Image: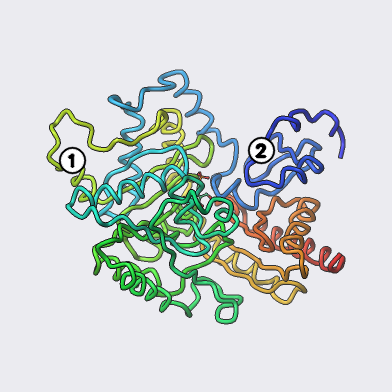
Amino acid sequence: MNARHHITGLDHYWLPFTPNRYFNAHPKLLVSAKGAYYTTDDGRELFDCLSGLWCCPLGHGHPKIVEALTRQAQTLDYSPAFQFCNPVTLSLADRVAAMAPAELTRVFFTNSGSEAVDTALKVAYGFHRLSGEASRMRFIGRERGYHGVGFGGMSVGGMVGNRKMFGPIMIPGVDHLPHTYNLSQMAFSKGQPTWGAHLADELERLVALHDASTIAAVIVEPMQGSSAVVVPPVGYLQKLREICTKHGILLIFDEVITGFGRLGENFGAQRFGVTPDIITFAKGVTNGIIPMGGIIVREEIYQAFMGAGAPPHAIELFHGYTYSGHPMAAAVGHAALDILAGEGLIQRARALEPVLEGAMHALKGEPGVIDIRNMGLAAAIDLDPIPGKPGLRGMKVFERGLEEGLLLRLAGDSIAVGPPFISTDDEIVQMGEGLRRAIKHVMQLGNA
Ligand SMILES: Cc1ncc(COP(=O)(O)O)c(C=O)c1O
């Protein structure tokens, strides 16, 4: 690589979710982005196979977003989040609520998915407490789930690497449903696997164990993203919904990845035909250009806070962030939703789904490929791990992918992709073929 000696900051920067020592020895810098491509500091173009970190489905450098940012910076660059609001944020709440299932009407803004999850958990507990059921303190997450890195999200999350260092400081009273992934039953599934709906019955077991009166909410990603695209079995989410309703437990869908079109509908809730009580969102709402997240809740939940009998001048929910509903983020949110609707990009994502499915499943039979799965504009490939060195094969394919012009997403020995909605059919086919070459190359190296 050229000009690497110009890189400064390696002595001071601590990268998140990154092997820092490896990074410092092999730094990777992106210096610009346009459309579906990044450019590296040594001048290579990389196809943005994961839309940033699942967050830039509309591509980079969209003129409408640049224009919205500039206009908003010149008009109202910040307004206090408490006691005041501004027209841009208010009207974005309208638009976000209008995209959600009709029963979900109220939007509370945060700045990230992690904050959205912790907000959702606090609101769920507060709702029960205000409804005279303060004993409902327990949360149920799911193995392999990812709900960000706040104390609540980490505790309901189910990815072992994110949890093992922090056991004693998890929030108490959390249990987990089993994950729904089973290689022997669903290898190479296209879309939703047909096996596994019965795993939702595990919720009945947890209710029997803890008693419904102690459980506040169940939180799941409708499609697990970070643990490499685990698609829910047919009927599974419906069953979870039924069991939650039967026992008065709130159902939270963490739609930080699946919200705003990734599954070819506004939200996963609509794609799967299951309406939760709370949706969390982030990422796509601003196309990832300015941080923003939030929750959308059923009207009854909001009304429980409003009607709790406190005097009218009293704050109903002691929770919020300095940057909740930041006007810059809200302005970008409007631009992103304009683009999503104006350019028909959710329909485009749906139309690209079979193209991605074809491109990824075409890799079945390549040496080392043990599973491929997909739904919407998301897919993952599992590679046979190098014995005794989990994650190394995946890392090698990821590195080789860069030589093929692909910025892939690495998760252990899985490679995930979630290309931008603006991708062409050909770009998606080429992404699959580039990945094939990367896998072939790495497999030829053997287990070294
Ligand atoms: C489902 C889900 N929830 C929460 C988060 C956390 O979001 P953030 O990184 O914005 O805090 C993520 C991030 O990938 C996610 O996929």
**Numbered circles on residues, count:** 2
Q: Quadrant of the N terminus?
A: top right
Q: Is residue 210 left or right of residue 254?
A: left
Which one is closest to the eye, mark 1 or mark 2? Answer: 1
Secondary structure at numbered mark 1 = helix
Residue 237 x %, y %? 38, 68
Q: Is residue 391 above or below residue 286?
A: below
* Camera sees residue 405: yes
Residue 166 x %, y %? 54, 50
The residue beneath circle 1 is 306
The residue beneath circle 2 is 33
Callout 1 environment at 10 Å: few (<14), some (14 to 19), or many (20+)?
some
Q: Is residue 269 above or below residue 28?
A: below
Going from N to C along the chain, the mark reached first, 1 or 2, is: 2
Residue drawn at x 52%, y 71% is: 191
Q: Is residue 269 above or below residue 336?
A: below
Residue 211 occupies which quadrant of the picture?
Answer: bottom left
Query: Is ligand 1 closer than 8 angstroms to the Cβ of mark 1?
Result: no
Residue 366 x %, y %? 75, 73
Q: Is residue 244 left or right of residue 337?
A: left
Residue 92 occupies which quadrant of the picture?
Answer: top left
Q: Is residue 446 left or right of residue 251?
A: right
Residue drawn at x 42%, y 22% is: 78
Secondary structure at numbered mark 2 = strand
- The amino acid marked with disc number 2 is Ala
- The amino acid marked with disc number 1 is Met
Compare residues 442 and 390 and report the one nearer the observer: 390
